Amino acid sequence: MKKVNTAVVGCGSWGKNHVRVLNQLSASNLVAVADKNLDTAREIGDKYRVKYFTDPYKIFNDSNIDFVSICTPAITHTELGLEAIRGGKHLLVEKPLSDTIQKANLLVKKARKEGVFLTVGFVERYNPVVEDACARINRGEVGEIILAHTIRANLRPSRVGGVGIVKDLALHDVDVITSLFNEVPCSVFAKVGAMANIYEDYANIFLSFKNNKSAFIESNWFTSQKIRKIRIMGKKAMINADYISQELILEFGEQKIKSKIKYSEPLYNELSHVLRSIQNDKQPRVTGEDGLCALIICEAALKSSKLGKAIGLKDIF
């Protein structure tokens, strides 16, 4: 099967990982990278022996390139994404899809109109522990889900692309929960705050679903130890999972069963899936609509905290 000619725009801490993985994948032919910092672009380009630019439009206008990963700050996603789509590129836009609902919606509509595949960097969907949990839920091992609780915390990153912790960090859990529940919440109630930054740096978000189901998302940028965990309670059993160690324990009352999960890098899994989808002319698992959905819920969380009340989502969806 023909390889996909790939490129990366934005070679910061996470973009470098995209470059590394795309260079490793057998389905990928890494062609070029771009970064606004010439030294960074040159360093990455020389390391992987590919073309490098400070102007991303040279990638978007290159008819030889099929797919682009956009790993720049969130406030640039819409402008760059629209140009990539105009250039006929399939693209992965790192989360959040954009910094506002309106701009994210532009990307979704444009990609649909131009017939290119748009996916969002919800890398946890490709974490083996999340895939295992989803499979167990779908097989009925857990029973109907009643409650989920996530904790996602670490020290503040050195650079955040124009959004706070809700759209940067909690967004992952919003997407995972709506995926596992297979539905969007009816309402959102949240408390967020900023202790040391312009943008909010801690958040507690409560999602209410139909039939008295709920989920609680806890996020902060103050915890020295990196934490990524989820607990899912069903009518038959409970799942405790760690995203980092990729360990999952299924609990039936006092009985605990540790799942045998083969460790693998979620980003590798994600990009591998996306390129295979492009080769097979099929929309990747995560869609632009998924990115828009998560952003709408996060905007509702921010609005809820500001107004001090729950925000209904029935009319939005």
Image (tube, helix red, strand yellow):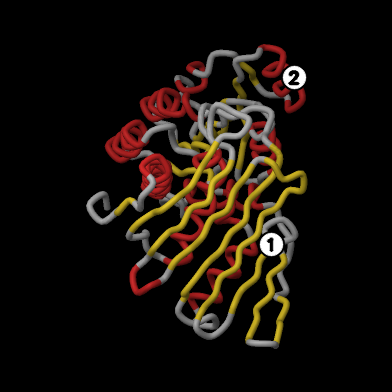
Q: Position of residue 295 (x, y in %)?
A: 41, 43
Question: Splitting the image into 4 quarters, where does residue 263 fall?
Answer: bottom right
Question: Splitting the image into 4 quarters, where does residue 117 fall?
Answer: top left
Residue highlighted by disc 2: 43
Left or right: where 86 falls relative to 127: left
Instruction: Tell me which residue sits at (66%, 45%) in the image.
Output: 25
How far apart are the two marked residues, 1 and 2, measured between alpha carbons? 34 Å
Instruction: Identify which amino acid the numbered label 2 is placed on.
Output: Glu
Kind of element beneath mark 2: helix
User: Can the viewer see residue 4 in this picture?
Assistant: no
Residue highlighted by disc 1: 242
Q: Position of residue 265 (x, y in %)?
A: 70, 52
Left or right: where 285 falls relative to 245: left
Q: Is residue 245 above or below residue 140?
A: above
Front residue of this view, candidates 37 and 234: 234
Q: Are marks 1 and 2 in contact (CB under 8 Å)?
A: no
Instruction: Tell me which residue sits at (72%, 45%) in the image.
Output: 223
Instruction: Identify which amino acid the numbered label 1 is placed on.
Output: Asp
User: Can the viewer see residue 110 in this picture?
Assistant: yes
Dot 1 or dot 2, earlier in sequence = 2
Q: Is residue 71 above or below residue 133?
A: above
Tag shown at residue 159: none
Quick one: which residue is furthest to the left in this view? Answer: 315
Q: Position of residue 109 (x, y in %)?
A: 29, 37
Instruction: Tell me which residue sits at (54%, 36%) in the image.
Output: 200
